Image (cartoon, grey):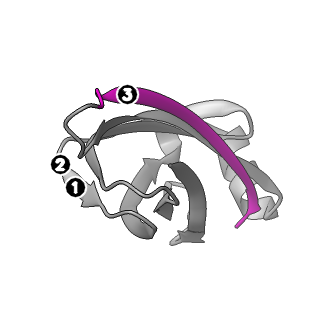
Amino acid sequence: PSVSIERISLSNLTFSGASIELVLALNNPGGIDLGLEQLEYALHLGGEPIMQFEMLEPKTLPAGDSRQVSTTLHLDLRTMGLGLYRQLSSGDVQFRVAGANLIRPLHPLMESLKLPFEVEKEGP
């Protein structure tokens, strides 16, 4: 299985805050259905971690299929600093999402696996 950034978009950028919509694509190119038991990840901007997330609602990722997981982040730039505002307003930002999937293959002979991932994207 793999994780990629499907879309990341910035909106409502002001001196006090911003909203970021993050859509991750989870892909299962294999021949066995997978149970996605947990997805934990952190969003980094310009090399700095700014938010952490955890999806605890189990999902099934069928063999040869993909699913999207979306999150809207509301950033308080008053507490995060002027440097982050400058990065976001410049439009030249390096986004990095790093985390891990807890995968349970839906096959009686296979055990659960914790698979780390890290993806990057310039944007928004």
Q: Residue at x 77, y 53 (%)?
A: 93
Q: Identify the element where label 3 is drawn.
A: strand
Say what amino acid the circle numbered 1 marks. Lys
Picture coordinates of residue 99, whole percent (x, y): 49, 33
Badge number at residue 113: 3
Q: Which residue is mark 1?
A: 59
Residue 116 inside the magenta-drawn segment: yes
On screen, residue 94 above or below 54: below
Picture coordinates of residue 67, whole percent (x, y): 39, 67
Q: Residue 109 or 102: which is nearer the viewer?
A: 109
Give me the C-alpha separation between circle 3 and circle 1: 15 Å
Q: Which residue is mark 2?
A: 58
Say what amino acid the circle numbered 3 marks. Leu
Picture coordinates of residue 114, whole percent (x, y): 40, 26
Query: Is residue 13 rendered to the left or right of residue 56?
Result: right
Q: Residue at x 25, y 31 (%)?
A: 109
Query: Looking at the image, do the residues carrying marks 2 and 1 touch, with CB atoms under 8 Å apart?
Result: yes
User: In which quadrant will I find the C terminus?
Assistant: bottom right
> Of marks 3 and 1, which one's residue comes earlier in the chain?
1
